[in-house]
Image (tube, rainbow, N blue to C red):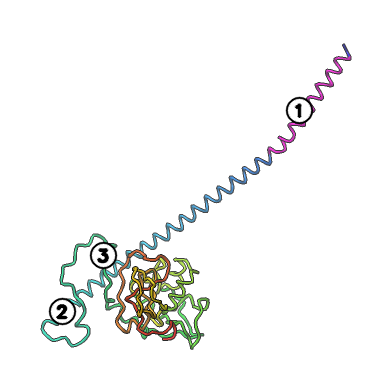
Amino acid sequence: MEVQSEEQTLTEENRENNKSKEQDPIEEQGPKTATKEQTSFEENEERSINIEREQETDNEWWEEAFLEENEENRICKKEDSAEQSEMDIAEARSSTRAPTDASDFQPTSSTATPAVASPRDCKIKKPRLPIHADRKFTTEHYELYQSGCTLTQTSAGKFAGTFEIYDDFKLILAKVQGKVVEIADIPTHGVRLDDLLVAKVLESGSFTKPQLHGKWPAEFDLEGMVRARRIPLGYAAKRYVEAGEKDVDGNIVQPGEEGYYYKWWGGLHCLMGKEGQDKGLYMTRPSFEKFKIRRAMGFKIDSRAVIQKPEGED
């Protein structure tokens, strides 16, 4: 009986030892599994925090864009009203005398202006001649940028309802002292960009919308779009178009129509430069139009370049 009890005791001890060995790996894996789960939880939590921060930043940006849009609408409405009054006076005077200068031929509307539902609605209309307040901001208005010249360090202000706030800026052309200006060499404060540099900056794809506005606020609004009321400056942006190519509106270039055409950013804004402005081709585009070609350059068949030379050589 004693021998059987001793054997039974040994058998029970062996069973307990085997159980402990089987449980050991589980106990060792337990903390590792917990550590992995904890790490995964922390990563997800950090990712959620980053997403919330990005959303907050994006909301702040759009809120600022909305405020600028409303401010520019308010200023434009006020100046439009003043310009309409000037045109009404000119029309009244023209009825009593023969026209003597180009200002007498300013287009006037013979129909009543429809009721306006909101500031946004009032800006969706056809291209028009630039208003009087913008007409002086041509290439000749600005002092040209030269290497080593002093640039203003002061902020240009939040809104660009009028270009008066950029009067102390220097105009930098695509060629300075006979040398082509590279994007990396363009100053990021105190300068106006000519049309060819505007095209180069946009086509590079190196800048976000806020960066475009922050570096060159006189040229780009908060949405990274060329300002609607910006007068063409300096060198024009062009491209050579072959027969058979389609413009942004789907028109096909016919044989004999090959040549240099002005570039249109997004199919909305024509970068015709000083040559187009001098020929009276520039019309202020409507605000809030939808892009015809998102974030890309195109051309329009009715925007054949005045000077048939490659860009930067006129």
Q: Which residue does the image show at 44% across and 83% down from the upper left?
A: 312
Residue 66: image x %, image y %? 36, 61
Residue 303: image x %, image y %? 34, 77
Asked whether residue 289 is drawn in magenta, I would say no
Q: Which residue does the image show at 46% across and 73% down from the upper left?
A: 201
Image quadrant in which you'd find residue 139: bottom left
Q: Is residue 192 visible?
A: no
Q: Quadrant of the C terminus?
A: bottom left
Q: Which residue is mark 1?
A: 19
Residue 25: image x %, image y %? 73, 36
Instruction: Decide which of 304, 39 is in the foreground and name it.
Output: 304
Instruction: Decide which of 283, 45 is in the foreground and name it.
Output: 283
Residue 91's tag is 2
Magenta extent:
3-30
Inter-mark Cα distance, 2 to 3:
23 Å
Tell which residue pokes out farthest to the front in this image.
255
Dot 1: element: helix
Left or right: 147 in relation to 249: right
Would you call the spot at circle 1 few (<14 residues within 10 Å), some (14-19), or many (20 or more)?
few
Q: Which residue is mark 3?
A: 122
Image quadrant in which you'd find residue 81: bottom left
